[in-house]
Image (spheres, rainbow, N blue to C red):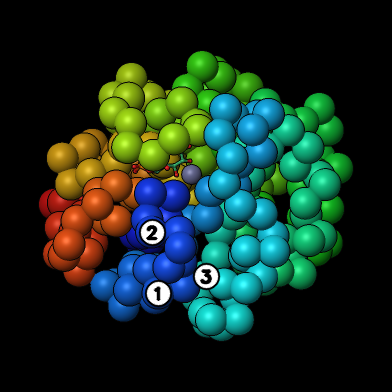
Amino acid sequence: MKLSIGPSILNSDLSNLAKECQEIINSGADFLHLDVMDGHFVPNLTFGHPVVKCLRTKLPNTGFECHMMVAHPEKWVQPMAEAGVNRYIFHLEATNDIETLVSKIQEAGMKVGIGIKPNTPVDDVIQYVDLCDLVLIMTVEPGFGGQTFMQSMIPKIKYIRSQFPDVDIEVDGGVSHVNIGCCAEAGANVIVAGTAVTGTTNKLKAIRDLREEWEK
Ligand code: DX5
Ligand code: ZN
């Protein structure tokens, strides 16, 4: 499968967001992973569709994925579509009506991703994979950047890949050149990396190292 790398801008200089994003894209990233938090679903706050909309004007051709760590994901589908988001990832734990939400996202013209937190069993998501373009396996407890990668999530990736050879499987949380190899081996092909990219002075090298390790 083809590798796609989407850095998370969570721990970047948010007062210089457009510049930071441009630099990340110029350093070889495939798309941007935008972490939206509401202080309810996770104990942290970030930004919403108004910021994404402004960012879109500065980066007209970049793929935007929003990772919605929010309590009512259905509420922001239309605003995020209008802001220029390409892929809308919601959390399975945040909704009781997954089918309706998926249809709503598709009708708004976005690709659909479904994410699960570390404590959610992989079996809970299996029945919805066929409806979605991407499954997101969280390898940290959502809420903050810079946490340690949870190796114990690897079997979830393996299991989904064994059942769904073609779906995009994304990993998010603590991914670096040290553990990306085992994500690749397990079957992940969409990689989010926050600190591993934004925490270095040489982003080009950071993204190149990730690619090299994934391909090994
Ligand atoms: C965590 C976010 C992640 C995270 C990535 O709640 O969803 O996208 O910030 O950053 P690192 O790679 O530093 O864990
Ligand atoms: Zn994320």
Q: Position of residue 4 (x, y in %)?
A: 38, 61
**Position of 103 compared to 13: left or right?**
right
The residue that mark 3 highlights is 63
Circle 1: residue type: Lys
Which secondary structure, mark 2? loop
The residue that mark 2 highlights is 13
Q: Quadrant of ligand 1?
A: top left
The label on residue 186 is none
Instruction: Say if mark 1 contacts mark 2, CB within 8 Å.
Output: yes
For marks 1 and 2 on the same chain, the one whose residue lies earlier in the sequence: 2
Q: Position of residue 23 (x, y in %)?
A: 33, 73
Circle 3: residue type: Gly
Of 202 and 121, the residue lying toward us: 202
Tell me where residue 215 sits by quadrant.
bottom left
On the question of residue 211 being in view, the answer is no
The residue that mark 1 highlights is 19
Instruction: Say if mark 2 contacts mark 3, CB within 8 Å.
Output: no
Residue at (62, 73) in percent of width and height: 54
Specify the farthest residue to the front: 15
> Does 154 sit above or below residue 189?
above
Labels 1, 3: front one? 1
Report crowding for label 1: few under 14, some 14 to 19, many 20 or more residues within 10 A (C-alpha): some
Report crowding for label 3: few under 14, some 14 to 19, many 20 or more residues within 10 A (C-alpha): some
| CB of mark 1 near ligand 1 (< 8 Å) | no
Alpha-carbon distance for marks 1 and 3? 16 Å
Residue at (32, 25) in percent of width and height: 150
On the question of residue 172 being in view, the answer is yes
Residue at (56, 59) in percent of width and height: 65
**Position of 25 compared to 91: left or right?**
left
Tell me where residue 66 sits by quadrant.
bottom right
Residue at (56, 19) in percent of width and height: 120
